[in-house]
Each structure stands twice: as structure tokens, then as C-alpha cells.
């Protein structure tokens, strides 16, 4: 299998400065004519041959001409990877005609059909499935695109840049010509054609230019675009205000499609979105959906600068645009909503997705050193850990220094394809600072472990704190160096106020820091705001955690103290689980004193009206089963599930009155609005309902059932349904049937219904999931459906996925093998859960490894799935 290495990077031998494309769109056979204006790279070495190589896969080549002379079959060669011919001495024009089949493109890379529309996905290497081209991001060209299509089925014809011509053709066809003045890599090319409805708005930029904003959706969805449009306008404004970055064309188009491998794609001026991240109205979308729409619309918009104007030299630099853009969208959301709540959400996500990746067989640096299939590197590490790296720069430089670095970066590199080193260099040069050690975060994989030890000297009024860091080996990297990281530390006095607070810069393996003027022995609030993305290993006594839960001025660490306490309780009960004959309640009794203290602290949080409701809702949620399973080897999914539920039940029983009051006090008769404040109120109420149902009292299941029937918005309905989902209550079947009826024809909404059932802890879940595969709305060809039913089963239902008899693994493995022939990218993405075998007991580990071997034995396995399965099995 071919491995591509970062160290082998070579500049292109040839550049394409201009591309003219003509598409004759037909579902079965689309004809693509391309004219490429090519010249040799003046910087290439002497003695190189004049062979031109253009990537191309799965296409029919009709003809190649150079400077209007058609090449004979002996003048070029074509294989599975592309087309080769000898270049003339001077700059030249290559004309290439190819044929592709959009209707048969189930990989959803390149040009394909979604519902009735044609659309494209070219990142990372999809353009080579449309025509022969140097499909690498350091080749940047201007594009002129002519689209010919049937006028009645495709009234809308879109590509990047500006519409410069359009008109009718014979035979009921018409055409449009688009020209993008900004040179761009092929991965940012897009084309959309279909019968789509359009919602319009506009935005006036800071310099006074009017930008037409359009969102294209399937007919009937026009009333579900408001929030995405509003998010787009707020993003445009925010980027001007915070980064000084203005939009650069007179139009900005978004298209929502049903079949999409990713969340969305930042093609220049023509973003294509998974419909799930555009369509929303109160009765179809939850608060969480609104939140995701806001952040993804912003993310793709922000790419116009961080990704498009300045792009990546090669795919190893993917985090150059993704880490930076994730940091930008996180900060945008923090400014739109609650900053601490946003940070909690981002860290929870990092710990749930990235830490396990960093500690498992697929661990790789933020800037990987090698890959077989680049699509496998759109990972939590490249995105979320990459964002943490940028956040650390922000912390170390402060907002002004960071902005100086950003300004220099865009100034210096506008219009270029650059590297992560170039980004760091701009930060260094603008601030006269050395990031050599900080840059190790780009190259060193693994989550660092951090310990601390404090020592109070009453006479000197000094508090000394010694930090120790260590990063465990990861595949291919045995020796790790100490990293540079900002660690924010607060010292609390007995009254709960801060005595001192500062951010120290850890650079050594072990290093001491001193706080002066400390008048009493403090309680330490360590790594505030998660300033360093590490695993803090030091345990604090229960009483200190309770104190921090109630007093820390850093809201993130209040939440963190609660999570730590809960995790510790659950883990100690789990270790007593076997001795107690698998009785979770008895296991909790063994730690009853700590449980009571924890419940007291939870109650104080619940009743603290000084804290915002969204925060309280988050702080009351126990760490998830997946997170707990990461904390101890071997993980026992049954024990985790039972102990966690038993603790929830105890909390529900002990605080029943408080939860009941909270539930009723937070009911609202006002019309639904998706703002953060109202969302927080709904979240707190949903948390209360969850605990009330967990208490086991039947009347609360009735309450949930009533809530489902009475509420007019999806957030409250899903809150009810997701607690009913695990019960035998008749309200469950009624609500699910109602949901199915209402949304039978509504793909994006029905996905919630599939996912709920896949995540149910009821005993009949696997059988039900198998049945649902035959549901008329289910198809393995739609990635959202696959993720909702199959993906949710593996990721959201540890208990059934890891069933002792192996039935979960067997079902899942069959699906991956089936999916690999349809959509390798999605199949590879879903393979990761099987790679966590090392976390489980021998029986489960053996079954998971056998599942991976079965996948590897598949005939014609894709490069995508092979890479993930083989690395996971190692
Ligand atoms: N889905 C990816 C993103 O926007 C493509 N670049 O981050
Ligand atoms: Zn992105």
C-alpha cells in the first residue's frame, strides 16, 4: 500500500494559471471539457524531464490535445492514477475531454447526484474524479466554468465567483458561465445544478460593498433557512470586527444537499452544506442543532480567509486552515453565547473525541508525517487539537499580540499556499518571540500528562507549585520531549475568593513556580479554562473538589471539579462492582459518604441562581459512558452503564423536590426563540426531567410523555423522547410513532428518530436496529442515515455495541464491509470504534481484533478502510 510522506514534498513541476471548464450535465454520462493554461515551474531543478502528470481516477478519457494538436494514443499514457504526456518547451494549452457518471457516483467525491440536483465535493482529492488535473493545493488557478444542462430539471446553475453570462440553448437546455477571479486550488472548486428554491438576503461590508447572500434548498424548505442566514450575517460582521477581515466578492452562495460525506465545504463563494447544518425551524430542530448551524456556517465562512485566500501547501498542513478555523468558530460562538459554557462544550468534545484518538492506535500529530488516504486525516486531532494549539498561541501572546501575528500572516501570505511553519513564523515575527518549542505540538502526538504538587510556606507567605509533564509513546514516536504550554492557576482562600491567579509558562519536564503574598494556605484551581490541553493527573481531596464546585471564579473549573468528582465516584463504585455481585447499588453504598457529599454539591449548583442556566445544566450532567470507559483498563461497559445509572437514580431521588421545582419553574409559554438564554432554560429543565425519570418514579415517565405531546418545539420534544427512549413506558411507542408519521418524508428530522432507537439501552435494541435497516427511509447510500443508525449504535450505545456475546461487533462489521463498496470514506470513518480493543477485557478485545481482521480480508478493500483497519489492528 502506498504511503505518502511529508518529507517527500516537492514543488510542482508545472503550474496551471487558468482553467476553463465546460460541463454538459447528464445524470448517466456527463461530458467535461477542460482547457488548462500550463507553464513550467521556474524554480524546478535542471535535468528534470518534461513529463507532465495530471491526476485522474475513474473517468473515461475521450481526448487530449496540446496547443490544439490532438495527441495520438502513443503520445500519452493513462493509468489508475492519472495521465502523463511530454510538455512542449514553452507554456502551453492542454485540452482534455472526459466523461463521468454522476448518478453512479456513490462515493460522493467529485461530481454526483443528491436527490435531483448535481453537486460536487472536491476536498481533498475529488477534483481528479471530474477531470485530469494537478490536483494538489499548491497549484492555484483561476477558474472559468460553463455549465450546460436541461433547463426544466436544472433551472439553477452555480459555480464559484461571478456569473458572467447565461442563456438558452437548443433542445430545452440552457447554460451559465461563472468566473472566479481569485486563484484557487482545485479542492475549492464547486458546481451545483438543480431545481432548488432560493432564500435571499444581503450584507453591507465594512467598506460599504453590498454582498448578495443566497441559500439554496429543496423546494418546501424555504422556511428553514432563517437561522443559517442570520448566522452568516453575524459571522461576516464578527470577522470584520475581530479579525479585520472583509468579504471579497459581491455574492455568497450556500447550497444545502441531503447526501454529503462531511458537515460542509468552504468552496470559494459557493459553500455546499450537509442539509442537517442549514435547515432549522423551532418544530424541526433542537437548540443543539441551532448551535451547530451557527458554528458551522461561521466555520465555512471564516475559511474564506483562513483556507481560501491563504491555503495549504500540501495536505500535511491541513491543520493550518482547520485548526485555525475551528479556533475562530469557537471564539465566534463564545462571543455569541456564553464563553464558559462554550469552553466546557469544546473541552468535553476534545476529551470525548480527540483524547481517545491521541491515546489509541490512530494517534497522529496535528501535522501528520504520513498517510495512505488523506480523507482519513480530517480528524479530531487535526481540527480540535489543532485549534487548541492556536488557542495556546492566543493565550501566550494575548489578544493584541495574537492579532498582530494574524495581520502579518494574511498580509504576507495572501494568495499563497503555505505551511504551519509559515503561520508560526508570522506569529513569531510580529511578536519577536520564539515558538520553536511550542511548535512541538504540531509534530508530537499524544496527550501530555501533567502533575502538580503545592507547598505553602506561611512565614514567607509563598505558595510554591511544582509542575511535571510527560507524554506517553504513541505509534511511531517513542521518545517525547517536554512541551511549552500556558497553565493558568488560581489560588482560593477559605472565603472562596481568589488570593492570587496567574498563567505560568511550563517549558521543562519539571518546573517550579512561586506565588508571593499568599496569606493563607490556599485551595488550588489548576489549569483554569483548560489553558493547556492535557490530562491533569493530580487528585485533589473530595472536600477541595466540593469547595471548587461551589466557589471557583473560573466557571470552567467549577464544572471540571464536578466532573472529576463524579468520575472518581463512578470509578470507585465500578471497582467494587464485581465484589458486590454486579449490584451497582451495593457498589455505590461502599462509597456512600462521598456520594452524599457529591449530591450536596450538585444541589448547591442546581439551586445557585447566580449561575447561568446553561452552565447549571452542563454541570449537572455526569461524565458520559465513553469518557468513563477511557479512564480505566479494562473498561467494563455493563458496569459503567449500571453504576452511572444507579448514581443518576440516587441524585434523582435525593433532589427530587428541587428537580421538580426546577422543572416547573422553567416551563415557558413564550414562543420559541433559539437564543442562548432561552436555550439554557430549556436545557436546565431537560436535565431536571432526566433526573426525575431516573429516580424511577412512574409519574415522571408520564410527565415526559405529556411533555412530548404538549410541546410545540423539537427541543422539548427530543428532551422528552430521549428519556422515554430507554423505558418500557407506553408513551415511548406513542411518541416514536407520532414522530415517524410527522417526519416520514423529512430526511434530516427523521435521522433523529433513527439515532434515538439505535442509542436505546433497551434489550431489544440490536434487533430493532436490524429491522430499521429495512425501513423505507433508510438507505446505505445516504451518509446521514448511516451515521444516524449504524454510527450512533457504535458510538452512542456502548452497552449494546460491546455486548458480551459479540452480536454488536458482528452486526457492525457486516455493515462496514457492505458500506466500503458504496462509500469508502464514510466506512473508514466508522471503523474507529473497533480500534479501541485495547481498552477492553480479553474476550471483547479478541472479538474486536477478529472483526478488524475480517474487514482486512475483504476483497477489493478501499484504501480508506484499509488504512484505518490495518492501523487499528496493529
Ligand atoms: N468539512 C471540512 C471543513 O469545513 C472541509 N474543509 O472543515
Ligand atoms: Zn474547516
Image (cartoon, grey):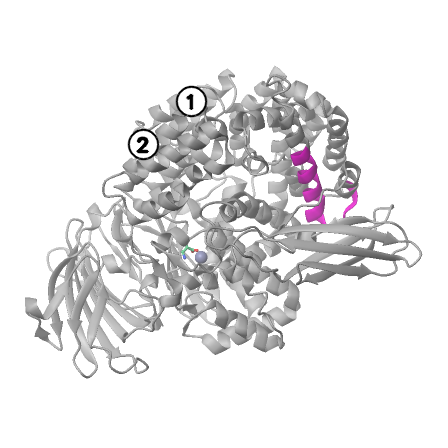
Q: Which residue is mark 1?
A: 805
Residue in the image at 45% along x and 32% along y: 845
Q: Which residue is mark 2?
A: 814
Residue 529 image label: none
Nearer to me, 309 or 466: 466
Whether residue 747 is visible, yes or no, is no
Whether residue 594 is visible, yes or no, is yes
User: What residue range appears in magenta?
Assistant: 550-568
Nearer to me, 244 or 489: 489
Q: Does 1 lie within the magenta span?
A: no
Which picture quadrant has residue 130?
A: bottom left
Toward the front, the furthest residue is 478
Characterize the local packing of mark 2: few (<14), some (14-19) or many (20 or more) Cα atoms within 10 angstroms. few
Q: Quadrant of ligand 2?
A: bottom left
Residue 401 in the image: x percent, y percent? Answer: 63, 71
User: Which tag is nearer the camera, tag 2 or tag 1?
Assistant: 1
Residue in the image at 15% along x and 49% along y: 28
Ligand 1 contact, mark 1 (Cβ < 8 Å): no
Q: Earlier in the sequence, mark 2 or mark 1?
A: 1
Q: Does 567 lie within the magenta span?
A: yes
Quote the CA–CA distance across marks 2 and 1: 16 Å
Which picture quadrant has residue 874?
A: top left
Q: Are marks 2 and 1 in contact (CB under 8 Å)?
A: no
Q: Is residue 565 above or below residue 454?
A: above
Q: Is residue 730 above or below residue 369?
A: above
Amino acid at each position: 500500500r502506498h504511503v505518502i510522506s511529508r518529507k517527500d514534498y516537492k514543488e510542482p513541476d508545472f503550474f496551471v494559471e487558468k482553467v476553463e471548464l465546460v460541463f454538459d450535465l447528464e445524470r448517466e454520462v456527463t461530458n467535461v471539457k477542460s482547457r488548462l493554461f500550463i507553464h513550467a515551474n521556474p524554480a524546478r531543478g535542471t535535468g528534470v524531464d518534461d513529463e507532465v502528470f495530471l491526476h485522474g481516477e475513474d473517468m473515461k478519457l475521450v481526448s487530449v490535445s496540446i496547443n490544439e494538436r490532438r495527441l495520438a494514443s502513443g503520445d500519452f499514457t493513462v493509468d489508475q492514477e492519472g495521465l502523463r504526456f511530454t510538455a512542449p518547451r514553452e507554456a502551453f494549452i492542454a485540452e482534455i475531454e472526459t466523461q463521468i457518471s454522476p448518478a453512479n457516483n456513490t462515493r460522493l467525491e467529485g461530481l454526483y447526484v443528491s436527490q435531483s440536483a448535481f453537486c460536487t465535493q472536491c476536498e481533498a482529492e475529488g477534483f481528479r474524479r471530474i477531470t485530469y488535473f494537478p490536483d494538489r493545493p499548491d497549484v492555484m488557478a483561476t477558474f472559468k466554468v460553463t455549465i450546460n444542462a436541461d433547463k426544466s430539471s436544472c433551472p439553477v446553475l452555480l459555480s464559484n465567483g461571478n456569473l458572467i453570462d447565461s442563456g438558452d440553448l437548443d433542445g430545452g437546455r440552457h447554460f451559465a458561465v461563472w468566473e472566479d477571479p481569485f486563484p484557487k486550488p482545485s479542492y475549492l472548486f464547486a458546481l451545483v445544478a438543480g431545481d432548488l428554491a432560493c432564500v435571499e438576503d444581503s450584507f453591507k461590508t465594512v467598506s460599504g460593498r453590498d454582498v448578495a447572500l443566497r441559500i439554496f434548498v429543496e423546494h418546501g424548505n424555504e422556511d428553514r433557512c432563517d437561522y443559517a442566514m442570520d448566522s452568516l450575517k453575524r459571522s461576516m460582521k464578527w470577522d470584520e470586527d475581530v479579525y479585520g477581515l472583509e468579504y471579497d466578492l459581491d455574492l455568497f452562495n450556500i447550497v444545502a444537499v441531503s447526501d454529503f460525506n462531511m458537515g460542509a465545504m468552504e468552496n470559494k463563494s459557493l459553500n455546499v452544506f450537509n442539509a442537517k447544518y442549514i435547515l432549522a425551524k423551532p418544530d424541526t430542530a433542537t437548540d443543539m442543532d441551532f448551535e451547530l448551524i451557527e458554528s458551522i456556517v461561521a466555520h465555512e465562512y471564516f475559511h474564506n480567509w483562513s483556507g481560501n485566500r491563504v491555503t495549504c501547501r500540501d495536505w500535511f498542513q491541513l491543520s493550518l486552515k482547520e485548526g485555525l478555523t475551528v479556533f475562530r468558530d469557537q471564539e465566534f460562538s463564545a462571543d455569541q453565547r456564553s464563553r464558559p459554557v462554550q469552553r466546557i462544550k469544546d473541552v468535553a468534545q476534545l476529551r470525548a473525541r480527540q483524547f481517545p484518538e491521541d491515546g489509541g492506535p490512530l494517534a497522529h500529530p496535528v501535522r501528520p508525517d504520513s498517510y495512505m488516504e488523506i480523507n482519513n486525516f480530517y480528524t479530531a486531532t487535526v481540527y480540535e487539537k489543532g485549534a487548541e494549539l492556536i488557542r495556546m498561541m492566543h493565550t501566550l501572546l494575548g489578544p493584541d499580540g495574537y492579532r498582530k501575528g494574524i495581520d502579518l500572516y494574511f498580509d504576507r501570505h495572501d494568495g499563497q499556499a503555505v505551511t504551519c511553519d509559515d503561520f508560526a513564523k508570522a506569529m513569531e515575527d510580529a511578536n519577536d518571540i520564539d515558538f520553536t518549542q511550542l511548535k512541538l505540538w504540531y509534530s508530537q502526538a499524544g496527550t501530555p500528562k501533567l502533575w502538580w504538587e503545592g507547598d505553602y510556606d506561611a512565614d514567607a507567605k509563598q505558595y510554591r507549585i511544582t509542575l511535571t509533564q510527560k507524554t506517553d509513546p504513541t505509534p511511531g514516536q517513542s521518545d517525547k520531549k517536554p512541551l511549552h504550554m500556558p497553565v493558568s492557576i488560581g489560588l482560593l482562600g477559605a472565603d472562596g475568593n481568589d488570593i492570587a491567579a496567574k498563567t505560568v509558562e511550563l517549558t521543562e519536564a519539571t518546573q517550579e513556580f512561586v506565588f508571593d503574598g499568599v496569606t493563607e494556605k490556599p485551595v488550588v484551581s489548576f489549569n483554569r479554562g483548560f489553558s493547556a490541553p492535557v490530562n491533569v493527573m493530580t487528585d485533589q481531596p473530595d472536600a477541595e473538589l466540593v469547595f471548587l464546585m461551589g466557589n471557583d471564579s473560573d466557571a470552567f473549573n467549577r464544572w471540571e471539579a464536578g466532573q472529576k468528582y463524579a468520575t472518581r465516584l463512578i470509578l470507585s463504585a465500578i471497582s467494587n462492582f464485581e465484589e458486590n455481585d454486579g449490584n451497582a447499588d451495593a457498589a455505590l453504598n461502599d462509597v456512600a459518604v462521598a456520594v452524599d457529599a457529591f449530591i450536596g454539591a450538585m444541589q448547591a449548583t442546581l439551586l445557585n441562581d447566580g449561575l447561568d442556566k446553561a452552565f447549571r445544566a452542563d454541570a449537572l450532567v455526569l461524565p458520559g459512558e465513553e469518557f468513563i470507559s477511557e479512564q480505566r483498563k479494562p473498561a467494563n461497559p455493563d458496569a459503567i452503564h449500571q453504576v452511572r445509572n444507579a448514581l443518576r437514580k440516587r441524585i434523582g431521588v435525593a433532589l427530587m423536590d428541587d428537580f421538580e421545582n426546577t422543572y416547573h419553574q422553567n416551563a415557558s409559554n413564550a414562543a420559541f426563540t433559539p437564543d442562548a438564554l432561552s436555550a439554557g432554560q430549556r436545557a436546565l429543565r431537560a436535565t431536571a426531567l432526566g433526573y426525575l425519570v431516573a429516580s424511577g418514579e412512574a409519574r415522571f415517565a408520564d410527565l415526559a410523555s405529556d411533555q412530548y405531546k404538549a410541546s410545540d418545539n423539537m427541543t422539548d420534544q427530543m428532551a422528552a423522547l430521549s428519556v422515554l427512549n430507554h423505558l418500557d413506558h407506553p408513551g415511548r411507542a406513542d411518541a416514536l410513532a407520532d414522530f415517524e408519521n410527522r417526519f416520514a418524508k423529512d430526511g434530516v428530522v427523521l435521522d433523529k428518530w433513527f439515532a434515538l432507537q439505535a442509542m436505546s439501552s433497551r434489550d431489544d435494541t440490536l434487533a430493532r436496529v436490524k429491522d430499521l435497516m429495512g425501513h423505507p427511509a433508510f438507505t446505505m447510500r445516504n451518509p446521514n442515515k448511516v451515521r444516524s443508525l449504524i454510527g450512533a449504535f457504535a458510538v452512542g450505545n456502548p452497552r449494546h455495541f460491546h455486548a458480551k456475546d459479540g452480536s454488536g461487533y458482528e452486526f457492525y462489521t457486516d455493515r462496514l464491509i457492505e458500506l466500503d463498496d458504496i462509500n469508502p470514506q464514510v466506512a473508514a470513518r466508522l471503523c474507529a470504534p473497533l480500534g479501541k480493543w485495547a481498552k477492553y477485557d480479553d474476550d471483547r478485545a479478541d472479538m474486536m481484533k477478529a472483526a478488524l481482521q475480517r474487514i482486512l480480508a475483504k476483497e477489493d478493500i478501499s484504501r480508506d478502510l484499509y488504512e484505518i483497519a490495518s492501523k487499528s489492528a496493529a
